[in-house]
Image (spheres, rainbow, N blue to C red):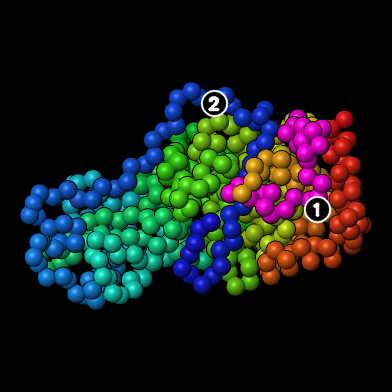
């Protein structure tokens, strides 16, 4: 889960899981691509200065002075990115021709390609170690973010005479990294309703743009307040995906895609990103990729238009309902692992708990399918509009317990039965699927 130093709360990421084998392509026997290499420290020959610029026996630099110098340095870098001044940005790089320096220049180009309407840094003194100064970066992607996003970025400084320059710039791994820092080689493709950025092949970027341009306007008609445009990230390597998530890679390869972002004081998402897992993208068929991305767009629409969160079984069930509608496959086929669990007597007896839908705790395949079937049961009781009304009525800003209470109160009026009645009808539905 991305963590942010901003006082605004970030909702936990919501995920897409594909259970149906028919949506998966054949797995390649080749090993997955190596992760993106970490930026090496600038190479030096003794007794040249290290990243901090301190020679053996030299006095330790004043921490407050280093903070002030870094603040000035980053102001110049930010201005260079905003205006596209390559020479000005290059002048802040300690060694433009070494690996870390070349990477910094790549990130400059990637940030320019992505397009930023806001970029600034907060340097909090003192900078006790010039080789590792953590700074809060604030930014907005133009045409996408409705409020600023923040991330923690680490800078290694090197003294050059009386000046300090940036020897290295890396993500800390604790926050969702800015796309240009996680994927300095990214390509950007823009559509009417999307900015797609990534290191995946151009065909993958184009296909994602087509899906969003087709699906997001439809969802916007159902969910007034849906963002007009969203950002989809397609990394090519698991290492890039882990950096973009800021979770150390805990969920990479375990879920097909995630959506997360900050929320405003009212509880509305202000800058969601859809991150497609690179391993899942390669395994999925074109239909599977379309289903996964449409699932995530349902989250984008709801999170941007309804303050708060719904019970997880309902929010994920609704997103799967929207996504699987694109599959064109029989319901029993899509629900095959759940059907097998029903026949084996191991299917859940109650609506899925948050734990059953947490990839860090459980094998979530059956839980997600069970949540999808709960949403299908709501549609059978109250229709498509009834399912949307229930999602809206069950969404609350007071956390999971408040959402559960709101849902229990809303069910009789929206679907004509209470939780026990819904559960009974849901279990009947599962039994019918398993016949």
Which stretch appears magenta? 333-360
x then y, percent, for residue 229 = 57, 54
Q: Out of 359 and 201, give the one closest to the viewer.
A: 359
Label 1 crowd (10 A; few <14 / some 14-19 / many >=20): many
Residue 293 left/right relative to 184: right
CB-based contact (under 8 Å), mark 1 and mark 2: no
x then y, percent, for residue 252 = 51, 44
**Whether residue 30 can be seen here:** yes
Q: Out of 258 and 254, give the one closest to the viewer.
A: 254
Residue 241 left/right relative to 272: left
Would you identify the image quadrant in which residue 267 lies? bottom right
- The residue tagged 1 is 387
- The residue tagged 2 is 27
Does dot 2 land on a helix, a strand or a loop? loop
**Whether residue 297 can be seen here:** no
Q: Out of 252 and 235, give the one closest to the viewer.
A: 252
x then y, percent, for residue 303 = 64, 59
Mark pair 1, 2: CA separation: 36 Å
In which quadrant will I find the C terminus? Answer: top right
Say whether disc 1 or disc 2 marks the residue closer to the N-terminus.
2
Q: Is residue 57 magenta?
A: no
Q: Is residue 174 above or below residue 281?
A: below
Label 2 crowd (10 A; few <14 / some 14-19 / many >=20): few
């Amino acid at each position: 889960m991305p963590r942010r130093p901003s006082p605004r709360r970030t909702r936990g990421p919501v995920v897409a899981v594909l259970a149906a084998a028919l949506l998966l392509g054949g797995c390649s026997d080749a090993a997955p691509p190596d992760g993106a290499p970490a930026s090496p420290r600038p190479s030096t020959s003794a007794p040249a200065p290290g990243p901090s610029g301190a020679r053996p026996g030299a006095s330790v630099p004043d921490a407050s002075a280093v903070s002030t110098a870094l603040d000035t340095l980053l102001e110049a870098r930010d201005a260079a990115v905003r205006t596209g001044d390559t020479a000005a940005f290059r002048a802040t790089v300690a060694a433009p021709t070494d690996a870390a320096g070349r990477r910094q220049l790549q990130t400059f180009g990637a940030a320019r390609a992505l397009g930023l309407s806001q970029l600034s840094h907060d340097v909090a003194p003192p900078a006790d170690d010039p080789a590792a100064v953590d700074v809060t970066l604030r930014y907005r992607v133009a045409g996408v973010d409705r409020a600023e996003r923040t991330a923690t970025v680490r800078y290694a400084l090197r003294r050059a005479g009386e000046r300090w320059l940036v020897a290295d710039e890396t993500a800390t791994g604790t926050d969702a990294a800015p796309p240009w820092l996680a994927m300095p080689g990214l390509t950007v493709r823009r559509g009417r309703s999307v900015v797609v950025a990534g290191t995946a092949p151009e065909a993958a970027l184009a296909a994602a743009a087509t899906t969003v341009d087709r699906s997001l306007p439809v969802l916007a008609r159902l969910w007034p307040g849906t963002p007009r445009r969203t950002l989809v990230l397609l990394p090519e390597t698991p290492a890039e995906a882990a950096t973009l998530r800021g979770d150390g890679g805990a969920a990479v390869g375990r879920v097909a895609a995630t959506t997360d972002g900050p929320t405003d004081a009212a509880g509305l998402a202000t800058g969601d990103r859809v991150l497609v897992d690179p391993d899942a993208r390669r395994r999925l068929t074109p239909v599977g990729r379309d289903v996964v991305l449409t699932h995530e767009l349902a989250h984008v629409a709801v999170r941007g238009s309804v303050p708060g969160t719904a019970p997880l079984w309902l929010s994920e069930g609704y997103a799967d309902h929207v996504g699987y509608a694109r599959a064109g496959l029989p319901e029993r086929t899509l629900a095959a692992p759940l059907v097998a669990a029903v026949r084996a007597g191991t299917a859940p007896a109650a609506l899925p708990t948050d734990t059953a839908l947490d990839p860090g705790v459980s094998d979530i395949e059956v839980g997600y399918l069970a949540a999808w079937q709960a949403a299908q049961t709501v549609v059978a009781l109250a229709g498509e509009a009834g399912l949307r009304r229930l999602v809206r009525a069950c969404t609350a800003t007071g956390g999971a317990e408040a959402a559960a209470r709101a849902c229990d109160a809303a069910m009789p009026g929206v679907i004509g039965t209470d939780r026990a009645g819904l559960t009974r009808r849901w279990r009947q539905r599962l039994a019918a699927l398993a016949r």
